[in-house]
Image: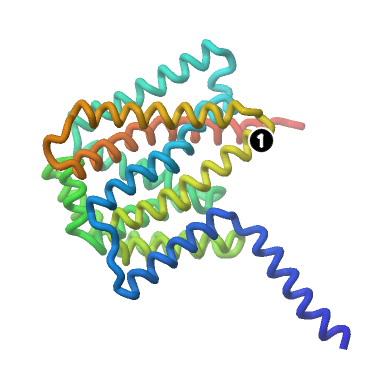
């Protein structure tokens, strides 16, 4: 009798232990993803395109920018700066790269869009199977960005035209044609993660279903804010635990300054033209500008960590 009572207790304890190992961002993302899919299943209307763009802009500013705002702290851990002069030099180079990416986009928008998608695929794919080959992470990120072009070709094509002119429609068409490979890549990434990190498999499956079912901006909003930014921001603060007020101060400053800059830019541009299109351009071209130096800093830190691990102890 005692053995029969003990067995369920052991099973409950194991289930509780597994639940404790599930990251909070997985639970938040899963809850929002399932809620969004339920709303779609019941036929409830999604926000209007105008509201989607505004919501995306606000939430990316509030939740997305802070995870990139940790870059100066990541750079310090990686040895890219140590002194106030080094800090100033790091920021100068960072801003130059951002401006350079934005100017390149204005000169060669289609090439810049393709490059941005490739870099973003590598970056977003690193949310899963981080300790595995770069090709596996790229497959996941490539799938994540390509499936919406298959499920909602008109919307993705229209957004790409806003970002890169008429050539953007061709980029969307290529992505849509590669959709079967994209879905296969997501499946491979989900299977690769299931043994050691099953929560990552759940995330990949939910993200894939969202990309197929939801309008592209709704999908990106839920994934980018509730999972990607949340995960990197939590990990960044965990790395800086015990660092006092500096991490919070840097995040606040490096979040507020870009928001003010974007606000000033929109004010200078004025209300001429289509405001949702203007917001979309500023949002994604700005993200492209910030993603490139962010990827450089993150990649350098990973190499720095590998060198430290290789040193004899």
The residue that mark 1 highlights is 241
Can you see residue 151?
yes
Nearest to the observer: residue 2 or residue 298: 2
Nearest to the observer: residue 296 or residue 275: 275
Nearest to the observer: residue 281 or residue 275: 275
Q: Residue furthest right?
A: 2
Q: Position of residue 308 (x, y in %)?
A: 65, 31
User: Residue at horizontal 33%, vertical 70%?
Assistant: 40
User: Residue at horizontal 29%, vertical 40%?
Assistant: 284
Q: Position of residue 193 (x, y in %)?
A: 54, 60
Q: Secondary structure at mark 1?
A: loop
Q: Residue furthest bottom?
A: 1
User: Residue at horizontal 41%, vertical 17%?
Assistant: 92
Q: Position of residue 212 (x, y in %)?
A: 32, 65
Q: Quadrant of the C terminus?
A: top right
Q: Is residue 145 left or right of residue 199?
A: left
User: Residue at horizontal 33%, vertical 32%?
Assistant: 289
Q: Is residue 24 left or right of residue 174?
A: right
């Amino acid at each position: 009798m005692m053995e029969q009572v003990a067995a369920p207790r052991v099973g409950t304890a194991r289930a509780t232990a597994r639940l404790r190992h599930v990251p909070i961002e997985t639970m938040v993302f899963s809850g929002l993803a399932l809620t969004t899919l339920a709303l779609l299943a019941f036929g409830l209307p999604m926000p209007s395109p105008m509201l989607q763009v505004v919501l995306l802009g606000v939430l990316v500013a509030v939740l997305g920018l802070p995870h990139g705002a940790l870059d100066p702290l990541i750079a310090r851990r990686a040895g890219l700066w140590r002194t106030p002069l080094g800090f100033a030099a790091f920021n100068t180079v960072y801003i130059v790269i951002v401006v350079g990416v934005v100017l390149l986009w204005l000169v060669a928008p289609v090439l810049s869009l393709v490059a941005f998608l490739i870099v973003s695929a590598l970056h977003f794919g690193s949310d899963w199977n981080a300790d595995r080959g770069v090709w596996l992470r790229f497959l996941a990120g490539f799938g994540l960005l390509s499936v919406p072009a298959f499920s909602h070709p008109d919307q993705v094509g229209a957004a790409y035209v806003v970002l890169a002119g008429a050539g953007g429609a061709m980029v969307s068409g290529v992505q849509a044609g590669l959709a079967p490979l994209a879905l296969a890549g997501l499946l491979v990434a989900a299977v690769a993660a299931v043994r050691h990190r099953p929560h990552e498999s759940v995330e990949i499956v939910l993200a894939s279903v969202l990309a197929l079912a939801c309008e592209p901006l709704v999908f990106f909003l839920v994934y980018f804010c509730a999972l990607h930014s949340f995960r990197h921001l939590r990990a960044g603060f965990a790395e800086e635990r015990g660092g006092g007020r500096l991490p919070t101060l840097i995040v606040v400053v490096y979040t507020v300054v870009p928001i003010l800059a974007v606000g000033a830019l929109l004010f200078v541009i004025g209300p001429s033209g289509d405001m949702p299109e203007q917001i979309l351009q500023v949002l994604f071209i700005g993200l492209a500008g910030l993603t490139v130096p962010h990827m450089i800093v993150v990649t350098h830190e990973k190499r720095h960590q590998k060198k430290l691990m290789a040193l004899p102890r």
